[in-house]
Amino acid sequence: MISVKTKTITLVLAIYLVLSAVFFFIRYLDIKDFAQASQNSELLKVKLVYNQTLKRTSKFYITRGYANINSFGIKEAFSKNDADSLYKLSLPRWNIIRKENKYLKSFCFYNKDGKLITYFGKKPQNYLLLSQKNTKSYDGFWQGDNSLNYHTVSIAKDKNSDVIGFITFVIDPQYFLFEIKKLMNIHAYIIYKDSDSRKNIFMLKDDKVAKDTIKSEQIENLKVIETKNGIFQPYIINGIGIDSQNSFKIIFLQDISHWKNTLQKAILQSLIAMIILILITAGIISYGFDMILKELDESNRKLRKSQNELEDLNKNLQIKIKKEIQLKLKKEREANEKERILAHQSKLASMGEMIGNIAHQWRQPLTQLSSILISLELYFERGKLTKDRFQVKAKEANEQINFMSRTIDDFRNFFTSKKEKEYCKVSYAIDNVEKLLLASLKNNDIDLMVEIKDDFDIYGFPNEISQAFINILSNAKDVILEKGMKNGVIHIEAFLENDKKIVIFTDNAGGIKVDPIDKIFEPYFSTKHAKSGTGIGLYMTKTIIEKNNNGKIEVQNIGKGAVFTVIF
């Protein structure tokens, strides 16, 4: 017959074994979920970096194209289809830009009918794709001469706004792989089908990981890939060409070797801890029973057993309480980490938006500086450059440079974070918004109307409040541009009502087509196109207003647009 001692040891060991197994399983799931969340976050970062790189490249080379169009003699050469003049006048610029980007293939000139006039670098296609269907600058991927390339097209117009030609930059798509590799150290390659439906693949020349992945032919099912270089999780971003026939895919390879090693290490640690606990428990119970049997009679043994069971129950209760507290703290840390990641993504998106605003702010002074330099050159060539004329032009140039310097100061002050709350006028926050966004709004023909009836004080973080206002304005601007409106209007009104401090933002973009409308404040929810919306701007706006600055934000549709009401 099995003794009470043996039964008790067996039962306790079984309980320990079950509890240890449950603890091991919970820890395994926590680590696995955290790894998955980190991988998803990495994918979002990759998409954000790709989209920002695409947008930055488009703006950079389209601006370069217009700079060349506005150079001396270029429009006249376009009007005459004068290939020699275009080549000679643009040769210095080509010598500069080809050193900046080794992936720049061609610098091309097409006439108003889209026919090639002349070019620098590798010979492009003879006719420009979709040149007759565009009246504004555009960019995109398309195949020419059986090769997929990225193109930016800047349109040259005469004084009557008639199209007289096109300037195109042709860039090898490997440039985007190089930029993402440089910024995030992630491997990638591009797949596309040519006009004969043959699959073409290209990557960076020194990317051994991509080469091994392509050789393994494991990418189609999007499952984890194991090669001699490590373990990788593939992600696909569908690249959008100039039309459906020019679509392609970018395959990104995230190294997850670290997470697999972490899971294996967690399993091993849990098994070792479980074995040690079982051995220690068995030894303690066996020793305790031997001492009890020697020192106490049957009655005392029963009493001791009851006391031991009560103590074990108390210990288990403490362990459970401790685990519950640890689990609650862990969930709070995870929630804070997710909040931090969202705030960081919002800041990256805001910085990308601000860079675009700097470009809008600088466009006019740069054009003015170019005009001043051309004037000086003409005066010098004609022998009419006097000291007085030179001083006047130098003063004009210095004024433009000072304006550009003040712009940099405005943007730098905006991103300066303050750790303590302070009082600031509502006019201060709105003035910051006007300084940073006015040029961008004007360049897109959007009127900004500001009406400050009561210039009240706000107690909080001034730059965060300005950031929230910018998010609301940028959202309204993006909707107006997305709908192609030519009479966009955004109205800001600040006033006091009873004890409430109120700021109202109104637009005429047709309202928000979401039900319920408050869903727009949820993270990663966006009504914009995937290329222009991250889904975190309005979420961070709500967090800034309500959590960080003790305010409240509401939204509703009224008349022809949406109304955002901020209450302090």
Image (cartoon, rainbow, N blue to C red):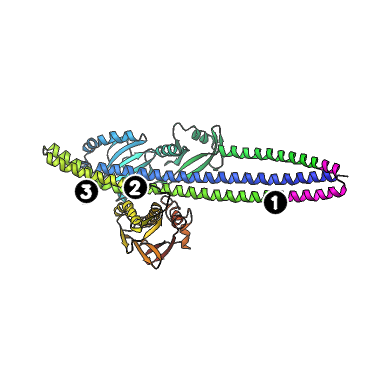
- Residue pointed to by mark 2: 411
Whether residue 76 is visible here, answered yes or no, is: no
Q: Is residue 568 above or below residue 310?
A: below
> Which is in the foreground here, disc 1 or disc 2?
1
| Mark seen at residue 158 | 3
Q: Is residue 292 magenta?
A: yes
- Residue pointed to by mark 1: 317
Most common secondary structure along the magenta stretch: helix
Residue 388: image location, x then y, percent = 12, 41
User: The magenta stretch spans which residues?
Assistant: 289-317
Residue 95: image location, x then y, percent = 28, 33
Quarter of the image containing the N terminus? top right
In the image, what residue type sits under mark 2?
Phe
Disc 1 to disc 2, how far (Cα)?
56 Å
Quarter of the image containing the C terminus? bottom left
Q: Mark 3 falls on what kind of element?
A: loop
